Image (cartoon, rainbow, N blue to C red):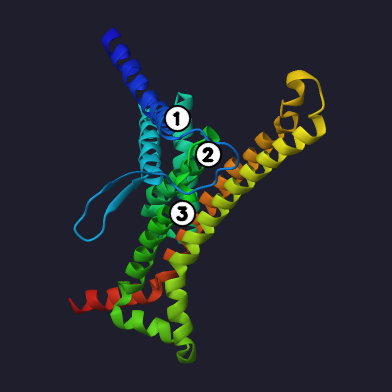
């Protein structure tokens, strides 16, 4: 019994380390790879190194590295919350795990229907990955959601799912969907292609704009503080009084509220687009005909 308790605590320690150490690693990596600079510095994801490839070289950037760090942290969180599950919840972690599962399932069932009930883990993954990626900015790390390549990858995956469920009723029905009505066929085709583009740029643009605004305001407050309090004696004239508190409030909005909101919006669009692409009545009608023939 004592060995089981020690093993349980050891696994908990490992899972907690999986949650924390990736963020610590990201902070240390940034300190070691970021040169000292003065003034405003707004740039894209840093390229650590490039792997030579036959067709096109593959750059390894902050976005890729931080995405993997987020995935490791989420994996550790999931393992920690589900460690020691019992038939009847008697721990806070199990209550939290059950609350996440139940509410994600309700969200999927309410927006996609019973047929897509199995989509709950996928939607939970989208919510978690997007939210935690944006929250990295709280630690001074580059948020992967600030890179359009990351959000575009997610949007392309969703586009494949949309196309797959549109093809459920056969390629002929899929082709006919663009000609409904026939005069709007060109616009329907453009709208189909525009779906992943709009999803990618909406998510990326909102997160990136928040980061840029936060940096500009923090720098502006530093300059304003120097103008207002610059004549004070000693170090008081150099201390950025106006940078105390205000950037933190802005960070709560842009990094926390806006990041979580964009994660929710991306997940909602995923559910609505995928569910809307599936013609359930036609699919089950064809399925009934095929079953009757067989």
Q: CA distance from mark 1 to mark 2?
A: 15 Å
Residue to which mark 3 is pinned: 108
Q: Residues within 10 Å of mark 2 (few under 14, many from 20)?
A: many
The label number, if any, that marks residue 31 in the structure image: 1
Q: Quadrant of the C terminus?
A: bottom left
The label number, if any, that marks residue 137 in the structure image: 2
Comparing 161 with 220, the one in front is 220
Side (left or right) of 134 relative to 58? right
**Image position, residue 191 (x, y; %):** 47, 76
Side (left or right) of 20 relative to 247? left
Q: Residue furthest bottom?
A: 183
**Image position, residue 68 (x, y; %):** 35, 40
Residue 28, by quadrant, is top left
Please say if 65 is above or below 268: above
**Image position, residue 253 (x, y; %):** 64, 43
Residue shown at 38% from the left, 37% from the top: 69
Residue 27, by quadrant, is top left
Side (left or right) of 110 relative to 223? left
Comparing 44 with 277, the one in front is 44
User: Which circle's residue, 2 or 3, is located before the other in the chain?
Assistant: 3
Q: Do we see residue 115 in this rendering?
A: no
């Amino acid at each position: 019994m004592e060995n089981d308790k020690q093993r349980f605590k050891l696994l908990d320690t490992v899972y907690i380390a999986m949650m924390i150490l990736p963020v610590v690693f990201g902070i240390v990596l940034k300190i070691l790879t970021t040169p000292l600079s003065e003034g405003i510095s707004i740039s894209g994801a840093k390229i650590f190194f490039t792997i030579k490839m036959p067709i096109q070289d593959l750059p390894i950037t902050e976005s890729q590295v931080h995405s993997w760090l987020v995935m490791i942290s989420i994996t550790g969180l999931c393992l920690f919350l589900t460690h020691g599950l019992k038939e009847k919840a008697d721990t806070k972690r199990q209550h939290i795990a059950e609350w996440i599962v139940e509410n994600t399932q309700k969200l999927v069932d309410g927006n996609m229907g019973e047929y897509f009930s199995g989509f709950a883990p996928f939607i939970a993954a989208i919510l978690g990955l997007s939210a935690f990626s944006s929250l990295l900015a709280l630690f001074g790390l580059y948020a992967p959601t600030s890179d359009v390549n990351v959000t575009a990858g997610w949007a392309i995956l969703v586009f494949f799912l949309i196309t797959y469920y549109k093809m459920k009723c056969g390629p002929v029905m899929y082709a006919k969907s663009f000609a409904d009505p026939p005069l709007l066929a060109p616009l329907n085709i453009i709208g189909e292609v525009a779906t992943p583009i709009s999803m990618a740029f909406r998510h990326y643009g909102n997160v990136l704009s928040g980061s840029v605004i936060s940096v500009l305001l923090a720098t502006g407050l530093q300059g304003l503080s120097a103008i207002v309090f610059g004549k004070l004696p000693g170090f008081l004239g150099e201390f950025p009084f106006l940078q105390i508190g205000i950037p933190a409030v802005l960070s709560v909005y842009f990094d926390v509220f806006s990041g979580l909101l964009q994660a929710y919006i991306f997940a909602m669009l995923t559910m609505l687009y995928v569910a809307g692409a599936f013609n359930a009545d036609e699919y089950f009608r064809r399925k009934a005909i095929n079953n009757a023939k067989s």
